[in-house]
Amino acid sequence: MKNLFSLNELTVEKIEYLLDLSEKLTDLSEFENIKKITNDKLVCNLFFEPSTRTHYSFEVAQNRLNMKIISFDSVNSSMQKKETFYDTIKTFDSFSLDLLIIRCSENEFWKQFDCEIQTPIINAGDGTSEHPTQSLLDLLTIKKEFSGFSGLTVGIIGDIVNSRVAHTNIETMQRLGIKVLLSGPLEYIPVLNLNDFPNAEYIPFPEILSKCDVVMMLRIQHERHLHKCCLEKSEYNKNYGLNSKNFSLLKRNAIIMHPGPVNRGIEITDELVECEKSRIFEQMKNGVFVRMAVICYLLSKI
Amino acid sequence: MKNLFSLNELTVEKIEYLLDLSEKLTDLSEFENIKKITNDKLVCNLFFEPSTRTHYSFEVAQNRLNMKIISFDSVNSSMQKKETFYDTIKTFDSFSLDLLIIRCSENEFWKQFDCEIQTPIINAGDGTSEHPTQSLLDLLTIKKEFSGFSGLTVGIIGDIVNSRVAHTNIETMQRLGIKVLLSGPLEYIPVLNLNDFPNAEYIPFPEILSKCDVVMMLRIQHERHLHKCCLEKSEYNKNYGLNSKNFSLLKRNAIIMHPGPVNRGIEITDELVECEKSRIFEQMKNGVFVRMAVICYLLSKI
Amino acid sequence: MKNLFSLNELTVEKIEYLLDLSEKLTDLSEFENIKKITNDKLVCNLFFEPSTRTHYSFEVAQNRLNMKIISFDSVNSSMQKKETFYDTIKTFDSFSLDLLIIRCSENEFWKQFDCEIQTPIINAGDGTSEHPTQSLLDLLTIKKEFSGFSGLTVGIIGDIVNSRVAHTNIETMQRLGIKVLLSGPLEYIPVLNLNDFPNAEYIPFPEILSKCDVVMMLRIQHERHLHKCCLEKSEYNKNYGLNSKNFSLLKRNAIIMHPGPVNRGIEITDELVECEKSRIFEQMKNGVFVRMAVICYLLSKI
């Protein structure tokens, strides 16, 4: 495999292989062996949208794999002189690097290139469409918690229509045998969207909370909403967010996840972000290993 | 020691040990030995306020110590999506790095973390409060000039109330046996402040100039002043700045220091910035060695 | 040689040596040998103007040469506190680095330093004055195409008055025996400018197209024009740009070059940017090797 654009391109077996590899990479001896593949390879991280978790966990992964790293800064680049995304990527392709990591606001950005880009590409989030490495780290977090996927129920709650994380997760989780439930304000889950995911059932909030092994809260993506959110901050939390009141509805072994950044007090109240059931910072930790695994996988050219 | 937040945490002996180590690090053979401690360690520099000297001398130090370096860029981070300083630091802590270098505008930023951050932290300047590595490089510059501290008089002149450099220096210098004098516009040195430093005497300008072995001019921190400076640029220099007229008042062996960036023509006139008595660029050079020493010290976990 | 400010400083023999070295650096075995010179050397890239091709091909070159790299980010630096270009460069000079790469908007920026900067400097473009490494990569592209320079005719077309690329190329190409023709809107090629280059002949557009082995289109530098361009986008292309209509005027073996970023649809229509005659992305590829060669040359201190 040369590129990773979408998890749709991976069989269930490949996804499980990547999750296994991610777990193994926490073991240094295994890791030294794999580092030969990535040693001194030159990667450029091109983030055309703001990012902390994804961008820097990629950089941590690349450093641990002993790669050489270039960080593209669009603010000080020729994009200030109106150079396009297309020409920027073509420029980096002409440099004969070993790998490009790309995040941008355009859905399926790779489809605009007539002839294929020579350099391998990992999609680090394209618009509202896909976020394959985020989905893998979510899966790794779930797998580590429950030692597998079959029989599990995941509830995805909130701004689903704008969430590339949700889009990638819904489909991939169902392929892995997970039952997916959706909830949140109806204007964030249009009918169209439900049609896209015929196997994902809508459950009103807070009823959904008692039905899930994993409660995945999504960030309200204010920056992608054309209109202001219909609800005030505290109103949103009361109706669709986790708080000390509805927390008691959760199953005894349920865990709380969130792709971050958390709007504290909206999707989740402050004190719950770091509560015992929360795996939010564990997700970030797992992100490093998943990205190491994906990079190794692509560069080993299996 | 795990973190360096304030020089108050260090005994006089520890401070002198760090200054000695800084001097030794200019010698490459000693240096190779120490590099084993820091080799391939992964550090992230998180500067939430503008910086040239501190930021890049840390990067030079880290490169010379053969560390792997990540530079956090808040402008292109999830802080654009309103993620807080707290969650940003927690995110980097979840990545299991070896060291964080943090500058931010909040005084004593580390006190907001309920449970301690796992990753070691070096304070690279917190608001108007402390700047331990700047103080160490000032001390190294003085030590190299006068071969010690006892019997010396240092005059700190200018915007003391807003200067974390001054706050750290006044206290540390007194502990090392240096006599500290203060001068500058009275609105920059409120009574409250003098009470904080009972052993630091106020001397009117320019009388102070003839009394000091070290004249340390402070930058007017326009960005921290709520009101415009009461004085025009040239007026300030005439009343509280160094210029060719009052330069003759300096002792024969006195040196001029400034933490930078210099507002040329305000604290010091242009031609004096690079005069023979100036150690301003020498301070920057010493900053690299002091930061190497502090990093070695923390990572060796003594 | 310590610095590279202008190609005027290099004899024709030195230029040819650098082009030969650039070609050799594509061969890895040769390259390993040369890497000893640059291994672990510490460079800082200081770009005070936006850049993609130059900035990142320097970073790629430095990575391939196994150097340690610091990227200065003026937006988050003390320049926000009004520190000058002069003091910023002096600061980096005080750090005792091995090399500085500098791009800035001031013509002949190096002349403002009274006493010489200790650290070697490569000029990565100064205002509208010079761009030596761009000129070298243009020459390398031409040399690879035509196996030499003598007897060739290069047409430089467009915003010549603002183009440091043109300034460096016109003079250097003539020294190498290339015949240089100029074309474009007359307000972009003032008489004064033609006087500067007495051997460069002005040929009206599109007549120039049939006379050249190399057609070098220049970017309209909107950001340097005080007044709006006198012509609309489509008008400019019709009168002074390459398009499917005048493309047929080109010689059979002629190639198209452009320093980038291309204003697609203005200097060249979209479909011609990646046509068979275009060497635009080949130029970017060559930029890496030329910059490797220049760095090796300076650091070997021949």
Image (tube, coloured by chain):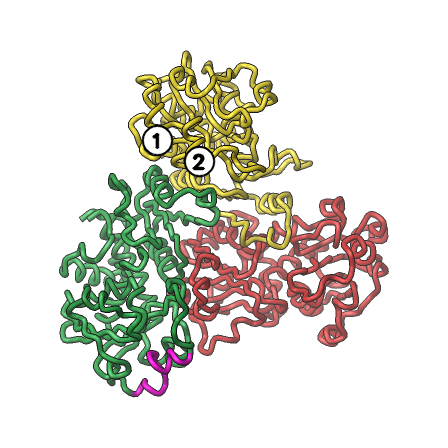
Chain colours: A red, B yellow, C green
Residue shown at 56% from the left, 60% from the top: A49
User: Disc 2 to disc 1, how far (Cα)?
Assistant: 26 Å
Across and down, in percent, residue B116 comes to 64, 35
For residue C200, side relative to residue A178 (left or right): left
Residue shown at 39% from the left, 52% from the top: C48
Across and down, in percent, residue A29 comes to 51, 48
Say what secondary structure mark 1 lies in: helix
Disc assigned to residue B233 = 2
- Give the residue type at disc 1: Glu
Label 2 marks a residue whose chain is: B
Say what secondary structure mark 2 lies in: helix
- The part of the chain drawn in magenta is C234-248
Reading the image, the residue beneath label 1 is: B282
Asked if residue C241 is among those painted magenta in the image, a careful observer would answer yes
Residue shown at 25% from the left, 39% from the top: C115
* Residue situated in front as seen by the camera: C33 or C294: C294
Vertical order, A247 against B264 (above or below): below
Across and down, in percent, residue A155 comes to 76, 61
Across and down, in percent, residue B236 comes to 45, 31
Q: Residues within 10 Å of mark 2 (few under 14, many from 20)?
A: some
For residue B133, side relative to residue A165 (left or right): left
* Residue situated in front as seen by the camera: A138 or B162: B162
For residue B176, side relative to residue C214 (left or right): right
* Residue C144, image quadrant: bottom left
